[in-house]
Image (cartoon, rainbow, N blue to C red):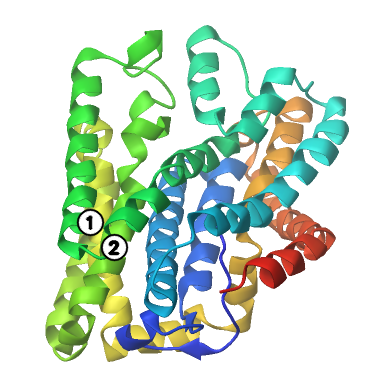
Amino acid sequence: MNEPINDTPQAGPPTLFARGAYISGLDGLRAIAVLLVMVGHFGLENVVPGMLGVTIFFFISGFLITTLLTREAQAHGDISVGKFYMRRALRLYPELLLLVVLGGSAGLLYQAVRPIDVAAALGYFTNYLLLHEEATGGAVRWPQLWSLAVEEHFYLTFPLLMWATWRRPRLFAALLASICVATLAWRFHVSQFGAPFGLLQAGANLPYTSLASDARIDSIVYGCLASLMFRRWGDHLAAKPWLALAIGAAGGAGLLLSLVWRDPAFRETWRFSLQGIALAAAFVGLYATPLGAWVRERLLDHPLPRRLGVLSYGAYLWHMEIVVACVAWAGFPVDLPPVQKLALVVGGTLVSFLLAELSLRAVAPAQRLRHRLFAR
């Protein structure tokens, strides 16, 4: 979820593809996204849109990876797919292993760890295991890892697709757009005819169209398309700030509409498409207008949200340990009395970021190795 570049903030579309330039605002957006997820899981899920936080993570991931690979292609004339996978493994796996080993050991006090939970965590198929357990009445040890599974399934093929087509940007964009259309059509099919393999859609707390990689992959692809949009039209949009501001405002309105429109058919089908398009439009306002530059430089790039964004991956991994313990010892967070729920929201958030800080420091040697061996 995090691919740090350097520590020098830059602003505006021209620097998005400048080699080595820090992409202003993304860490701050990560901080907002992970807070939405955590606060929802800590008992305010009926008030805070936690699923939107995950969708923002997906979008940022696609946007960032496409931008970084575009930089690599421009600088070196090609894309090293092997190095991409090694960089990603060294970035994500060390903290994930810490969660499985340490969290699994400590968690024996409140929930047993099954071999299938470990296999799903390390093999990135927690989302489908979670759907299976929901259909059969079971429970998954690390349910939050469903979103990592969606991302990794996407990245099994995306670098190869970009490597094969980056010299033909129109073809590349057309293929990505076709994925968005096909995924939406698949959600309509599942919503009408049910999920495959006996998994749950209708009446499920977490339906197939929310968790399955084949039904959510477009949430990442919209971020990829936004990066291509800035590559093609970024300077043009920046030259017309009022147009860019209007597009950004429309994006914000689209996100709000996706939250207040509670029709089940919409939420199972169009919701994630609307959110992807709306986020792309909101990024126009964020990266192509003076107001967006002010928001990034004064708010999102403040040292606190930037640090929380760097820690967002670890906080996302560890916060469910607190939720699982709470469920075992005190009941579901959403059912707690208001005072206890508030204490869980505040205390759980602070402890999650503390654990994220400690885990990031613990895996620092792996991160230094990543930068030393695979810097391009």
Q: Amino acid at mark 1?
A: Phe
**Residue found at the very far front of the displayed protein:** 77
Q: Nearer the viewer, residue 299 or 115?
A: 115
Q: Residues within 10 Å of mark 1 (few under 14, many from 20)?
A: some
114, above or below 348, in the image: above
Badges 1 and 2: C-beta atoms under 8 Å apart?
Answer: yes
Quarter of image, res 271: top left
* C-alpha span from label 1 to label 2: 6 Å
Q: Which residue is the site of mark 1?
A: 172
How many marks the image carries: the answer is 2
Q: Nearer the viewer, residue 272 or 3?
A: 3
Look at 56% across and 29% down and name the residue there: 126
Look at 44% across and 69% down and name the residue there: 68
Quarter of image, res 254: bottom left
Look at 46% across and 77% down and name the residue there: 25
Q: Which residue is the site of mark 2?
A: 166
